[in-house]
Image (cartoon, coloured by chain):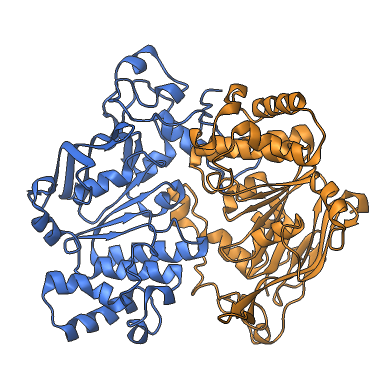
Chain colours: A orange, B blue
Amino acid sequence: MPENNVLVRVEGLKKHFPVLRGAIIKRPVGYIKAIDGISFEVMRGETLGLVGETGSGKSTTGRIILALYDATEGKVTFDGTNLMNLKPREMRRLRRRMQMIFQDPYASLNPRMTVEQLISEPMLVHTRMTAKERRDRVHELLELVGLNAQFDRRYPHEFSGGQRQRIGVARALTLNPEFIVCDEPISALDVSVQAQVVNLLEDLQEQFHLTYLFIAHDLSMVRHISTRVAVMYLGKLMELAPREEFYSSPLHPYSQALLSAVPIPDPNLQASRKRIILKGDIPSAASPPSGCVFNTRCPIRVERCFKEVPGWRQVRPGHFVACHLVEAEPMGGNTLR
Amino acid sequence: MEPKVLEVKELVTRFRTLEGVVHAVNGVSFHLEEGETLGIVGESGCGKSVTMLSILGLIRQPPGKIIRGEAIFMKKDLLKLSRQEMRQIRGDQIGMIFQDPMTSLNPLMSIGKQVGEGMNEHLGMSKKQVRDRVVELLDMVGIPNASERVDDYPHQFSGGMRQRAMIAMALSCNPKILIADEPTTALDVTIQAQIVDLVKALCDKLGMAMIWITHDLGIIAGVANRVMVMYAGHVVEQADVKVLYDSPRHPYTLGLLGSLPRVDGQHSRRLTNIEGRPPALFQEVQSCPFSNRCSYVIDRCRRENPQLRAVGSAHQIACWVDVPTDGKTKVVINA
């Protein structure tokens, strides 16, 4: 992959949140390892789907990339610039190029601001546009996301969930960003409205050559929208592969279980399909298992999995896995041993 | 056809709110046969939960009001029973599982007490008997070390385990009907698979009839024998599960299925958009409630609300138009 194709590079990223105890002087008594050493790249123009269950660290990853959280360790590079030790002024300049669409369109829009105020806020912070220019841009953006430009004086409560999410999208697009972190942008929406928002995101990507990091737990939607898919579990990456390869031949036992757990809207297929039902719950990120973090639920674990943390290896071109039991077979036909 | 354990006729439920009267359920009729699982699908606000709450006598009146209808269960009309009589049935002959296991469990009461509450109330068992039965139930729903964990409080349980405890509670008095209202929506997909499997197995084992309410057409395909699709407080389509997915006939069902990406599907397909959103339900619907979003709309749809009509054996739709039946026809709604 040529170097200039990489827009975002994440290397050895860790984020440990301290668990504080104490009445007056709060001392850390432990750490929640929200992210524990992950590395991946986001290519220009692609959609990287980042999937995982609750507490896997997928949202934290998105937030660190946008420098909303500081990393405990590791490095994030955006278009060749290391974000970890930037001066605030330099950071601000880069910020306009990366934006975020949030999960909950009910909580992420200030209820006391009008749509115009909401969408023009980034322009006030980052540009010296005049009031007229800003208003024109707001109207342009509203039309772009499929809302009536005359709605600019309305407040968020006057809109439905899908329309609010469109406002969120317009707000993210205000400064012509290159990279957008979509943090579960559709999980709060109804099925038929989800399709509307996803179609909009796809159209905008094509029109403005956007790069997306699409964080979700819905593997069906991720299949629909992503170029490549990365799977997280308890703060670690389990697998990363091009979409078709991931869905047709997932290598990691967790990916396999995850895919087989997704309900398919087809009763005939549901009846015939073989499913892997994982036992037990996701362990707490405060005390993850030693060795491979998946070893408490893995159907094919061996002794080694309890002792050694599996490395992050490329087993086929562009296909990364962290599992002791997956062997790299250069001839193809890669399977679990 | 198996004998009916529950038959609901022409149920109408409304709510008085500050903005006006909300017509939440508008003449819903259906039945549940012995041992079957009926899936009720619809988006938020379509009336699927209110239908169930009305039947169970769990609608606060006021602001809610059940205007008319019948719900026949064991030769009795549930809607005419006194609160006292209804309490006898609820939790005893009809079990319930709700969406959010965190808010539907009492945080100040141990899991064992909560699971056993119904048995104290309905079966008149001794303390010792109840406790033994609770441990047995918790074990049956797959809680490890049930005899030790019976004294735990809800916060000590994970989301999946709380939902298991809810299931144990619902089953404690051997109900004839189990009503599951979005029981897996708050859970992760691998845990969801566990719970779906568990409930299905228990239903088979105990021979219960079940009503599974959800917005997820994927889950319904795997659990239900029959499916009822609701929209704006109306039943718009009703069919055997295979028939519904193979040859859906109502434009709304077609749109819903088209808007779903599939984990086993092709990418190239653009998702079907159902433009617009459901009506606000502040007035009695005179037209077809879906007419303003439907691509097959004809004049009649705007004048008259269609009633359910048979389009096949055990397949009914509420639509004036004959929509293609092969199910593979790509339907673009409001393109």
**Residue A148 appears at what percent x and percent y?**
59, 23
Q: Image height check: is B73 above or below A335? A: above
Q: Answer with left or right where residue A78 lies relative to residue A155.
A: right
Describe residue B176's horizontal placement relative to residue B191 as left or right.
left
Q: Along the line of sight, which residue is nearer the eye, B218 or A143? A: A143
Q: Is residue A282 left or right of residue B13?
A: right
Q: Looking at the image, is B14 positioned above or below residue A58?
A: above
Question: Is residue A113 visible in the rendered structure shown here?
Answer: yes
- Is residue A274 in sight in this rendering? no
**Res A109 quadrant in image:** top right
Q: Which one is in front, B7 or A82? A: A82
Q: Quadrant of residue A152?
A: top right
The image shows residue A332 at horizontal and vertical percentages of 77, 62
Q: Which residue is rendered at x = 27% and y = 73% of the image?
A: B115
What is the x, y in percent for residue B132? Answer: 23, 84
Out of A23 and B286, give the one closest to the viewer. A23
